[in-house]
Image (tube, helix red, strand yellow):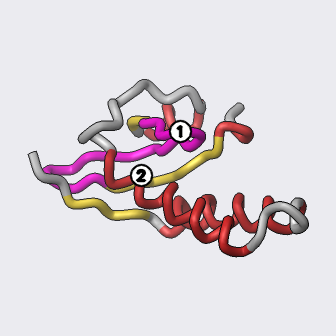
Amino acid sequence: MQYRYEVRPKASRKVWSFYRHVALKFRHTFDTEDMVRNAKRAIRNMGLIEQSLLRRKPTIERWQKAGWHMANAGKWYYAYTISGDTITIEDACHEQNMH
C-alpha cells in the first residue's frame, strides 16, 4: 500500500530541538552541518514507517494512552496513527529521552 505521510509540528520540533541542543553542547565537535544532516535524516526516516519500519507497541505510557503505534529508526522512536492511506507522525523521541 502507498501511504501519505503527515508530520505534526510537535514531532519535527522534537527532532530539530534535540540536535540544536547537541550542537550547542558540543559546539567544538558537532557543527551546524551535522545538526542539519542528522535532523533531516531523522525526519526523512519517518517516511519509512509501515514500509521498512515495523509497527511496535509503544513503550512510552502517554503514547499507549493516546492509542498510537510506535516505530523505531536508528536512535529515534516515532509515535503515529493510521487513517486510511494517511500516516500521521504525532510525536518523536530520541532514545536518550525514552522513559
Secondary structure beneath label 2: helix
Residue 94 x, y percent position in the rendering: 64, 45
Label 2 is placed on what type of residue? Asn
Look at the image and give the residue range highlighted in magenta. 71-87
98 relative to 93, above or below = above
The numbered mark at residue 74 is: 1
Question: Does the residue at mark 2 contact the one at mark 1 (Cβ under 8 Å)?
Answer: yes
Residue located 9% across and 45% down the image: 1
What crowding class fits label 1: few (fewer than 14 Cα within 10 Å), some (14-19), or many (20 or more)? few
21 relative to 51, above or below = below
Residue 43 x, y percent position in the rendering: 47, 60
3 relative to 23, above or below = above
**Residue at the extreme bottom of the image, as rendered:** 32
Secondary structure beneath label 1: loop
Residue located 86% across and 68% down the image: 24
Left or right: residue 63 versus residue 45 is: right
**Residue at the extreme front of the image, as rendered:** 29
Secondary structure character of the magenta stretch overall: strand
Of residues 30 and 92, the one nearer the viewer is 30
Residue 16 x, y percent position in the rendering: 63, 66
How many marks overall?
2
Q: How many angstroms separate mark 2 from mark 1 (CA)? A: 9 Å
The C terminus, quarter of image = top right
Of residues 80 and 17, the one nearer the viewer is 17
Residue located 35% across and 36% down the image: 53
Q: Quadrant of residue 56?
A: top left
Q: Quadrant of residue 3?
A: bottom left
Label 1 is placed on what type of residue? Gly
Residue located 28% across and 52% down the image: 87
Find out whether residue 73 is within the magenta segment: yes
Residue 49 x, y percent position in the rendering: 33, 44
The numbered mark at residue 45 is: 2
